Image: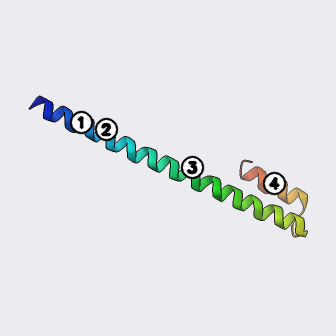
Amino acid sequence: MLTEGFLRIILMVIVLTAIIVILVRFRATKSDEESRDSLNVLKEKLDKGEISREEYEDAKRRRGK
């Protein structure tokens, strides 16, 4: 009886750890892609002359880059 409870706890810890790892990896990948995309859009706008260098630097700072 004690063994059964112990196995359930271990199984629960393993499942929760797997869920956390999956969520962290998914979120990190998604955040990186979004940051690169917005930064690329800013660079394109800068190259086209749609925004000034100052606006580009300000937007870049706001994104934490």
Quadrant housing the N terminus: top left
- Identify the residue position indicated by label 2 in the image: 13
Q: Residue placed at 65% from the left, 59% from the top?
A: 34
Q: CA distance from mark 1 to mark 2?
A: 6 Å
Please, which colouring scheme is shown? Answer: rainbow
Q: CA distance from mark 4 to mark 1?
A: 50 Å
Q: CA distance from mark 3 to mark 1?
A: 28 Å
Mark 4 packing: few (<14 Cα in 10 Å), some, or many (20+)?
A: few
Mark 2 packing: few (<14 Cα in 10 Å), some, or many (20+)?
A: few
Q: Amino acid at mark 1?
A: Ile
Q: Disc 3 or 4, which lies upstream in sequence?
A: 3
- Identify the residue position indicated by label 1 in the image: 9
Q: Is residue 14 left or right of residue 49?
A: left
Number of marks in the rendered image:
4
Q: Amino acid at mark 2?
A: Val
- Residue 16 position in % (x across, y down): 35, 43
Q: Residue placed at 27% from the left, 41% from the top?
A: 12
Callouts 1 and 2 close, C-beta under 8 Å: yes
For marks 4 and 2, give the one nearer the viewer. 2
Q: Residue placed at 64% from the left, 52% from the top?
A: 32
Q: CA distance from mark 3 to mark 4?
A: 24 Å
- Residue 58 position in % (x across, y down): 81, 54
Q: Is residue 8 left or right of residue 21?
A: left
- Residue 7 position in % (x across, y down): 20, 35
Q: Secondary structure at mark 3?
A: helix
Q: Secondary structure at mark 1?
A: helix
